[in-house]
Every structure is written in C-alpha cells, then in structure tokens.
C-alpha cells in the first residue's frame, strides 16, 4: 500500500510525538509511505520505519504565507501525480491541495476550535479569530474526507454533532513510547524533604496552569510542606505571560519553575516527581497524561473530556477552572499515602494497551477500510 502523508510545517510537542510514534512503530515497514513536511518538522521526527521516506520541502518553511499557499496550489498535485499513492493522510486534520481524486483521510487532533469556552477565553483576539477559522476549515475537511480518525469516544461524539456528514470514522487512541516506565514506589512520608509536583503540557489559555500555581500556593500555606512546582513545555505568548504573572503574584519564583526539556529527559522528570498534575480542560487523548500513567506517578487530573476515559480510577479529579478544586485534589494525594500507592500501581496497568504499534495498525486498517469502501 502506498500512502502520502501531509506532515505540515509546524505543530505541538504532542503532534511530533504522534508522527514519530505512528511512523516509527514498525507497522509501515512493508508499505511505501512518504511524509511531506518542512525541514524543521523532519528534524523533529526521529527514526521512522524502513518503508517511510521523509520528503523535505523548503517552501513549506517559508515565512511568507503566500509562498506556502503557492506550493500547495501548484506543487502538491504534481507530487500526487508523480507518486500515485493509494491514499492521502492529513494528520493535522485539514485537507490541503488537490489530491486528484485520491481518497483522503483526516485525523482529528484539536478540540479547542469545537469548544465554546475557548472562544470565551480568547475573545476577539487574533488567536480567537484563528480558532474560528480552524473550526471552519476542519468542519469542511471532515465532510470532504473519505474517512476521519478520532482519538476518543468523547471527541468523536462531540465533533460529529457539530460537523455532520462524516462518511466513515474510527477511534484510534494516542499511545505511549516504550521509554516510559514506572520509577520508584511513591514515598509514604512526604514530609521528609521537598515534594516535587510536575506538570508537563503545552501552555495555552485552556490549560489553566496559573490555577495550579494558586492551588499549590494555598497548599504550601495550609500544609507547611516544601512543595516545588515544575512546568515543562512551551506554548503561546498570551498564556505564558499569564502563567508568569501568576508566579509573580503568588511570590512563587523560589518554588515554581517554567522551562522546556529535550525529549530524552522527559521520562526522567516523570520518574523523579512525587505528584503529576494535568489541568487542561480541552483535550482529545493527551499523550503527556498517558506518559505520566506509564511512569507510575500519582496523578491529579482535570475531570473534563476524555481524561476520565483514560485515567479511570487511577487518579484524583478536579475542576480545572477552580483553584479550590485543584487544591483539594492535591491535598488528597499529599495526605493519603495509600491513595498515592494505589493510583501509582493502577495507572501503568491502564497504560499498557496503548502502544504505537497498536495505534499504527489501527490507522493502517482504517486506510484499508476506506480504500475497500471506495472500490465497492
């Protein structure tokens, strides 16, 4: 089978993990797969299957939007005609270029354009307008595609209600790489030395990291524990500024840090923390939460969208928009050693089925379904 993949020119850390996991799983060794992407995306992909060829297109990295659009209008169809793929895969969800009648499959990654609360958070800002444009483009793409892949039951239900007219759909959850595994058992006595709380996620207005700062500040005062808070991830300037302002307002510079880590060091960060906090209110199937589960970390998680579907009873839940709710969840894990141990033992078990080989096989099988449906 021959598949042409629109790798794009940018993306979040989760997007790059997705591409690397899917096409480095060994599932596509016997196929012919081409990933067309910008040079920066190619540099972040990492090793891929023997059947996968990465085609770097410098025009996709052009700072001029007009140059990028020109490439999609003129060169993409030439590439399709030359390679003659059986199917075209769009991992970012948006169908671009003329694929000359070749079946196209879109993958849904972002819930932000489909949730009213995100528009309330961004208002009439340029980012708010970008969300609306994304919603219109994704809606049009999902209707035009011969198939759409979703990551969870929740996101499939929610998006399908808004879009309508989707021809064929499948659920293929994200997965966790083999480098993530349980570290030492949770400490029973958290009063001995600093308590390290970790949050690994991109920083956006719907991630609510500033509420975590306020919640941990509250717990520092009430518990007397030396709580340290570590944020790992980059993001949009508007949300980063709000997080930095929260750190200043709570006089947290001495115990709260914000930085990015190389991919190879993220697993170490999970294993060395005492509690993992995931405060996002808008997600599909978050890879970083899955990584924390595989690492055997006691988890306090947002109760929104697909998070309870993923974590089940292996964590403590909170309302990500309520500082008090976050503080209560963290307090539960701080004060109950048995709860920490139970959550840390259950979460890796729940993460076991989510391998990239399984996800890639499901994607490949869905492509075959789309092609078979087209033939019949």
Image (cartoon, rainbow, N blue to C red):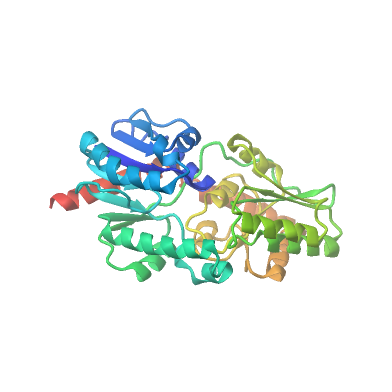
Left-right relation of 223 to 245: right
The answer to which quarter of the image holds residue 162 is bottom left
Q: Looking at the image, which is closer to me, 74 or 211?
A: 74
Q: Looking at the image, which is closer to me, 308 or 101?
A: 101
The residue under the point 82% across, 48% down is: 194
The residue furthest left is 376
Left-right relation of 207 to 339: left
The residue furthest right is 224
Q: Looking at the image, which is closer to me, 30 or 299?
A: 30
Relative to 113, residue 81 above or below: above
The residue furthest top is 50
Residue 44 in the image, given as x and y percentages of width and height: 50, 36
Relative to 97, residue 223 above or below: below
The residue under the point 51% across, 59% down is: 283
Relative to 368, residue 343 above or below: below
Task: Tally the marks.
Answer: 0
User: Taking the image as drawn, is residue 336 in sight?
Assistant: no
Residue 281 in the image, given as x and y percentages of width and height: 56, 64
């Amino acid at each position: 089978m021959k598949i042409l993949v629109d790798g794009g020119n940018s993306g979040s850390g989760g997007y790059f993990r997705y591409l690397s996991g899917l096409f480095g799983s060994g599932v596509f060794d016997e196929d012919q797969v081409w990933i067309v992407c910008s040079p920066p995306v190619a540099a972040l992909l990492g090793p891929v299957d023997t059947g996968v060829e990465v085609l770097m297109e410098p025009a996709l990295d052009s700072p001029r939007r007009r140059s990028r659009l020109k490439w999609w209008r003129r060169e993409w169809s030439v590439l399709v005609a030359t390679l003659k793929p059986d199917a075209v895969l769009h991992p970012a969800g948006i169908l671009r270029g003329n694929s000359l009648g070749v079946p196209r499959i879109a993958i849904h990654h972002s819930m932000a354009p489909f949730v009213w609360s995100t528009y309330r958070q961004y208002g009439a800002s340029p980012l708010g307008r970008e969300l609306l444009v994304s919603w219109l483009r994704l809606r049009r793409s999902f209707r035009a595609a011969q198939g759409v892949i979703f990551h969870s039951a929740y996101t499939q239900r929610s998006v399908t209600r808004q879009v309508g007219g989707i021809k064929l759909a499948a659920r293929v959850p994200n997965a966790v790489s083999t480098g993530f595994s349980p570290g030492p058992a949770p400490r029973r006595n958290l009063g001995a030395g600093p308590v390290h709380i970790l949050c690994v996620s991109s920083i956006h207005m719907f991630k609510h990291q500033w509420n975590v700062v306020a919640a941990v500040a509250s717990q520092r005062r009430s518990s007397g524990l030396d709580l340290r808070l570590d944020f790992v991830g980059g993001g949009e300037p508007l949300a980063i500024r709000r997080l930095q302002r929260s750190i200043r307002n709570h006089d947290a510079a001495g115990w709260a840090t914000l930085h990015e880590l190389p991919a190879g060091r993220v697993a170490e960060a999970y294993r060395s923390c005492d509690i993992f906090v995931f405060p996002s209110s808008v997600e599909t199937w978050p890879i970083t939460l899955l990584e924390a589960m595989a690492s055997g970390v006691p988890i306090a998680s947002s109760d929104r969208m697909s998070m309870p579907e993923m974590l089940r009873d292996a964590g403590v839940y909170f309302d990500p928009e309520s500082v008090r709710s976050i503080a209560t969840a963290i307090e539960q894990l701080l004060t109950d050693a048995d709860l920490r141990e139970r959550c840390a033992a259950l979460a890796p078990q729940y993460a076991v089925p989510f391998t990239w080989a399984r996800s890639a096989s499901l994607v490949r099988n869905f492509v075959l379904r789309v092609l078979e449906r087209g033939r019949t």
